[in-house]
């Protein structure tokens, strides 16, 4: 099973959009079995697929971290469609962060055990963790559960600062996560000199990048309003084409 955490300490760089569209294309184009894990208390990923999630009795990522979940890992998932399942999020993740600060509570190993159980059952091809900005209990748990970190970034200083912060944090986790690798995914790119300059800066700092870059298009924010993946909403748009390229790049490595 392939495991990826999508994170950057900077918000608004396309983490959730990337999780949605990468998972959608892996399922639709490659017949892969994908589990999405929402690690963000804002629950944007959850609300995209389950607009009425707040009114439903669901097991969430917070429940898994607390150990208050079903013993069989797959019984905690919400089926979205054949091949795609979701472990939802909720604002309870914020309470867990506060509890960890006050009481020293730490349960990231429970999410790792959840991922390991899925891998052992061989029922899932990909588990993709959508992480919040910042270093939270859930994001640390995700990092301990994956083999790769995908860092979406815009071609601006604040995004690159977020990239360097994440890579520094990953170095701090190297003992607990041997073999963990990270790569940057440039998002919302356009024909501008600054994009090339940012690429050069990242390469000069020896930060690996994906071959694929996601081009800017208004179709992306529009798709979040209609709650449709890009493959359905605007299949010929530049971003839809680019997300297909990203999925293909990852599948080449499997």
Image: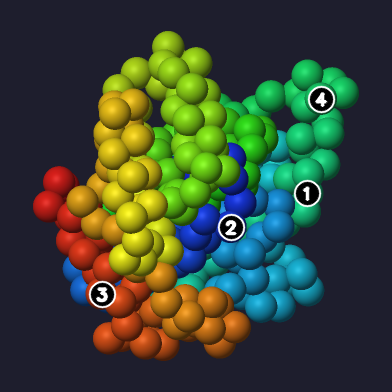
Q: Give how far apart the Cα atoms at labels 3 and 1 are.
A: 36 Å
Which residue: 34% across, 18% down? 178
Q: Which residue is mark 3?
A: 241
Which residue is at a point 32% across and 32% down the rendered structure image?
Answer: 207
Instruction: Say which quadrant the N terminus sits in.
Output: top left
- Tell me, yes or no, whether the two marked residues, 3 and 4, touch with CB atoms within 8 Å: no
Residue to which mark 4 is pinned: 101
Q: Is disc 2 surrounded by few (<14), some (14 to 19) or many (20+) residues within 10 Å?
A: some
- Which sits earlier in the primary sequence, circle 3 or circle 1? 1
Instruction: Evaluate whether residue 78 shows in this view.
Output: yes
- Residue at position x 59%, y 83% from top? 225
What is the CA distance from the residue labelled 3 to the residue labelled 2? 21 Å
The residue wearing badge 1 is 92
Q: Nearer the viewer, residue 30 or 212?
A: 212
Residue at x 77%, y 53% (from the top left corner): 91
Q: Earlier in the sequence, mark 4 or mark 2?
A: 2
């Amino acid at each position: 099973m392939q495991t990826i955490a999508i994170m950057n300490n900077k918000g608004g760089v396309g983490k959730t959009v990337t999780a949605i569209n990468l998972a959608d294309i892996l399922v639709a184009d490659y017949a892969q079995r994908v589990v999405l894990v929402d690690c963000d208390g804002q629950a944007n990923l959850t609300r995209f697929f389950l607009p009425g999630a707040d009114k439903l009795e669901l097991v969430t990522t917070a429940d898994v971290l607390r150990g208050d979940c079903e013993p069989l890992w797959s019984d905690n998932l919400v089926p979205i469609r054949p091949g795609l399942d979701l472990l939802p999020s909720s604002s309870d993740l914020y309470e867990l962060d506060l509890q960890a600060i006050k009481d020293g509570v730490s349960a990231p190993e429970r999410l790792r055990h959840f991922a390991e159980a899925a891998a052992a059952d061989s029922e899932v091809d990909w588990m993709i963790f959508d992480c919040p900005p910042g270093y939270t209990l859930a994001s640390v748990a995700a990092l301990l559960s994956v083999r790769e970190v995908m860092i979406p970034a815009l071609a601006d200083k604040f995004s690159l600062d977020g990239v360097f912060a994440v890579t520094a944090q990953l170095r701090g986790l190297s003992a607990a996560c041997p073999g963990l690798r990270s790569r940057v995914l440039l998002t919302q790119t356009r024909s501008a000199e600054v994009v090339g300059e940012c690429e050069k800066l990242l390469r000069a700092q020896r930060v690996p990048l994906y071959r694929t870059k996601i081009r800017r298009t208004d179709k992306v924010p529009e798709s979040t309003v209609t709650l449709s993946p890009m493959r359905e909403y605007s299949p010929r748009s530049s971003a839809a084409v680019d997300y297909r390229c990203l999925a293909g790049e990852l599948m080449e490595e499997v």
